[in-house]
Image (cartoon, rainbow, N blue to C red):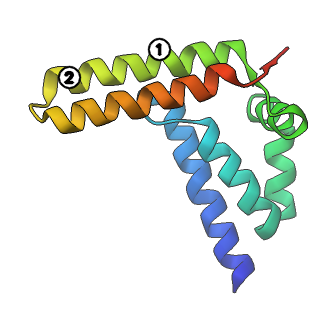
Amino acid sequence: MARLMALILAYFFLGLAMAGVFLPGLPTVPFLLLAAWFAARGSDRLHKWLYEHPHFGKLLVDWEQSRAISRRSKIIAVVMLIASWVVMYHQLDNVLVVGGSALFFIALATYLVTRPTAE
């Protein structure tokens, strides 16, 4: 039962990671890391596929080996955070939500930028 739940969660987070590739504001890498973690517990085949994937594999290996994020991923993430916040600023009237989001996005961007850069 635990293995089945891990497999379901792995596919769920993989779906969110794939959606994050196309949707601004939805992160890809955290969901990909969760998908890999659950896949390791639910399906050796899916876990192997993720690590051998031409795009996702390098992200996972870089993170696993040195907790590193590629420069391109950092730039895209920070630009998307800024773009998401600008859209929220123009669409929402709630100062607390906009301000809280700004603080969260700044903390997230700081975390991303301070990680080692994968080459």
Tell me which residue sits at (62%, 58%) in the image: 11
Give the mark count: 2
Amino acid residing under circle 1: Val
**Image spot of residue 14 (x, y percent):** 62, 49
Q: Which residue is mark 2?
A: 89
Give coordinates of residue 13: x percent, y percent.
Answer: 58, 53
Q: Identify residue for label 1.
A: 79
Using a 10 Å C-alpha cutoff, classify the residue at mark 1 as few (fewer than 14 neighbours), some (14 to 19) or many (20 or more).
some
Residue with the most extreme bottom position:
1
Decide: few, some or many residues near mark 2? Use Cα within 10 Å; few <14, some 14-19, many ≥20: some
Nearer the observer, 10 or 119: 119
Residue drawn 74% across the image and 34% down it: 56
In the rendered image, residue 7, in percent from the top left (x then y), is placed at: 69, 68
Question: Hey, what amino acid is under mark 2?
Answer: Tyr
Calculate the distance from the C-alpha at mark 1 to the C-alpha at mark 2.
15 Å
User: Is the residue 82 above or below the residue 101 in the image?
Assistant: above
Which quadrant does the C terminus fall into? top right
Q: Nearer the viewer, residue 29 or 67?
A: 67
Disc 1, SS: helix
The answer to which quarter of the image holds residue 87 is top left
